[in-house]
Image (cartoon, rainbow, N blue to C red):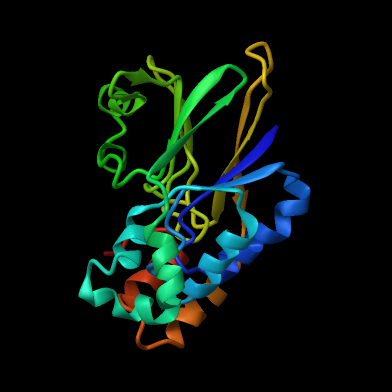
Amino acid sequence: MKILFLADLHGNLPATLALEKQLPRIGADQLWYLGDAVGKGPSNAETCDWVRAHCDHFVGGNWDYGIGGREYPADGYFWNQLGEERLQWLNGLPRETELTLSGVRFRVFHGRPVTELLTTTTDSSVMGAAFSRGEETFGGIIFADSHRPFVRSLAQGYAINTGSVGNSLGVNRVHALVMEGGDSPEDMLTFSILSIPYDNEAAAELARRDPELPHRDAYIHEVLTGVYSR
C-alpha cells in the first residue's frame, strides 16, 4: 500500500496543479487529506473542490473549521468564494483518524485544533504528548499545520510532518508525504518527503489581481520567499 498524505493547500491553485501533474509518477493507491484546503490564497473554491475530487480520506484543519464554521467575521472573503455547501463540508470534517501500516499504529491529524504543541516546538519530550489519546497510545503521528516537512524518530515512535502543498515555509516548493508499507508487521515501511517545484510567481500574480484578498501582501511574500509574514 502506497499512501500520499497532503495538506495545507491554502487556496494556492498553481501549487495544487503542480502536485496533480506528478500523481501518475507518484502512483499512490490512496490520497489522504490532512487539513487546510482553504484560507490565505485566492483560489479557495478550486483547492477545496480538488481535495474532494482526488482524496480518499479526510481530516480537517484549523482554517477549515475557522472558515467553515464562520468563526471570524474578517473571513467573509473566503465565505463568499466557497458558498454554503462547501462551508458545511469543511466544518463537518473529522478531527482525526488513524492508520496501521507494517505493524505501526499511526495517529493522523492536522495539528490544531487537536493539539497546539506541534506548531510551537520541536522538543521531543513535548511532542511526545501527541502519541497518547486518553488511555490509547500510538507508535507514530502523522500531521501537518507547521508547513515544514520532516521525519523524526522519537522515544515514543515516529513523528512525521507532511509539509504544505501551497504555503511551504523555509523551502517554498510543494511538499507532501508518501508512505509505503503492508498489512504485516514484518513488511518494510518507507517514508518519503516529496519536494515539487511550482510557478511561485503565477501564484503571487493571482493574488495581486485580487485586491479583496485579506493579508494579500503577506501571502505573496510567503509564496515567493517561504518566510512567514503574518
What residue appears at the point 67 percent right and 15 percent down from the top-left corner? 184
Asked whether, in this view, residue 13 is left or right of residue 60, the answer is: right
Up/down of 26 relative to 216, above or below = above
What residue appears at the point 67 percent right and 11 percent down from the top-left corner? 186
Corner quadrant of residue 187: top right
Up/down of 209 relative to 122, above or below = below
**Residue 12 visible to the viewer:** yes
As drawn, the residue found furthest toward the top would be 186
Residue 223 or residue 26, whichever sits in front: 26
**Residue 159 visible to the viewer:** no
Asked whether, in this view, residue 11 is left or right of residue 136, the answer is: right
Tally of numbered discs: 0
Quarter of the image with the C terminus is bottom left
Residue 69 or residue 226, whichever sits in front: 69
What residue appears at the point 40 percent right and 66 percent down from the top-left corner? 88
Picture coordinates of residue 77 (x, y %)? 34, 80
Up/down of 122 relative to 89, above or below = above
Picture coordinates of residue 199 (x, y %)? 60, 69
Quarter of the image with the N terminus is top right
Picture coordinates of residue 75 (x, y %)? 29, 74
Picture coordinates of residue 162 (x, y %)? 50, 43
What residue appears at the point 46 percent right and 88 percent down from the top-left corner? 209
